[in-house]
């Protein structure tokens, strides 16, 4: 099965970064001039994704992008979504945990649990301030991979961004193919190693090789990165679709996109 996971901030031609997740306001009006025009949005939905107002896809509009994970969990429990499934993630951000302490929680604890138990442990304590954090808007896809829900991930990144905002040592063998102007194939493979601690900034290949050899390896997840609009080509073969408003990463002037997207889905 395949799900479309779309963030409204993809439709902004200047990518905002490093906004605190707790910020409840909207992106400043400065970004209004960078919001796509309605025709551009409709062309992308219809020509790049193949969506049609005549053949609507079951879907949902959410506020924070981490609600995608909760929506998928709901569908899984209702036996409407079969795991593992493919995710087409169209966003200005990878949402794979970069800048989040959840990665340490996942690799040091979550991966040690039986797979069926992992979704019941979404909280972790920050080593910086001691606060308890849950699944966030920028790391929910990493949790979904740790749950073994995702069999393939495609990241259609904003062409005005870098498209490399992920944790490099989550990649298979910690090897990365760099991104330019063409689609790039990498692979994500999470590792659990209760013996050795691997510093995030390690670059010694012998240390890396030893760590990989001594680790328990999670299933490999093919990871396709598409950094351009022209290479986003689908024929509406999605089982479900979701649009995240992401209000702290979008100006209020972009909210019209919600109504446009609703024309292409059957809300559930």
Image: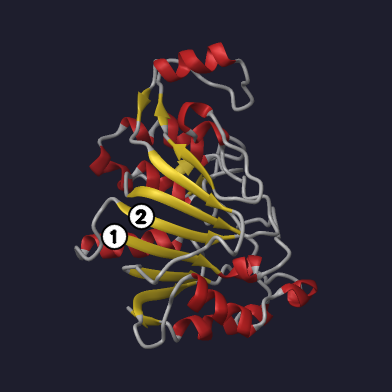
Q: From this viewpoint, is residue 24 visible?
A: no
Which numbered dot is residue 86?
Answer: 2
Q: Quadrant of residue 42?
A: bottom right
The residue under label 1 is 1
Position of 43 relative to 115 (above/below): below
Q: Position of residue 240 (x, y in %)?
A: 34, 69
Label 2 Cα crowd, 10 Å radius (few <14 / some 14-19 / many 20+)? many
Label 1 Cα crowd, 10 Å radius (few <14 / some 14-19 / many 20+)? some
Q: Position of residue 210 (x, y in %)?
A: 47, 13
Tell me the residue at 32%/49% (across/down).
Answer: 149
Q: Secondary structure at mark 2?
A: strand
Tell me the residue at 39%/15% (across/down).
Answer: 214
Q: How is the image coloured?
A: secondary structure
Determine whether label 1 and label 2 are within 8 Å by CB.
yes
Position of 188 relative to 31 (above/below): above
Q: Position of residue 136 (x, y in %)?
A: 51, 54
Q: Is residue 143 left or right of residue 29?
A: left
Q: Secondary structure at mark 1?
A: loop
Q: Earlier in the sequence, mark 1 or mark 2?
A: 1
Q: From this viewpoint, is residue 268 visible?
A: yes
């Amino acid at each position: 099965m395949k799900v479309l996971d779309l963030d409204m901030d993809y439709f902004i031609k200047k990518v905002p970064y490093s906004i605190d997740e707790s910020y409840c306001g909207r992106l400043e009006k400065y970004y209004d001039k960078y919001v796509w025009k309605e025709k551009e949005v409709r062309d992308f939905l219809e020509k790049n994704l193949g969506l049609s107002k005549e053949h609507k896809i079951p879907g949902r509009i959410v506020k924070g992008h981490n609600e995608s994970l909760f929506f998928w969990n709901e569908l899984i429990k209702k036996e409407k979504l079969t795991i593992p499934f493919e995710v087409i993630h169209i966003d200005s951000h990878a949402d794979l945990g970069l800048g989040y302490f959840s990665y340490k929680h996942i690799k040091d604890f979550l991966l040690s649990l039986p797979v069926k138990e992992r979704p019941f442990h979404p909280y972790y304590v920050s080593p910086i301030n001691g606060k308890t954090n849950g699944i966030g808007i920028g790391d929910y896809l990493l949790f979904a991979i740790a749950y073994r829900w995702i069999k393939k991930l495609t990241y259609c990144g904003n062409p005005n961004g870098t498209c490399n905002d992920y944790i490099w040592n989550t990649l298979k063998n910690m090897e990365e193919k760099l991104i330019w102007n063409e689609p790039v194939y990498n692979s994500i493979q999470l590792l659990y190693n209760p013996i050795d601690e691997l510093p995030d900034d390690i670059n010694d290949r012998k240390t890396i090789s030893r760590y990989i050899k001594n680790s328990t390896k999670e299933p490999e997840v093919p990871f396709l990165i598409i950094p351009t609009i022209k290479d986003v080509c689908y024929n509406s073969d999605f089982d479900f679709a979701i649009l995240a408003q992401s209000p702290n990463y979008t100006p209020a002037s972009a909210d019209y996109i919600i109504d446009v997207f609703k024309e292409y889905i059957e809300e559930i």
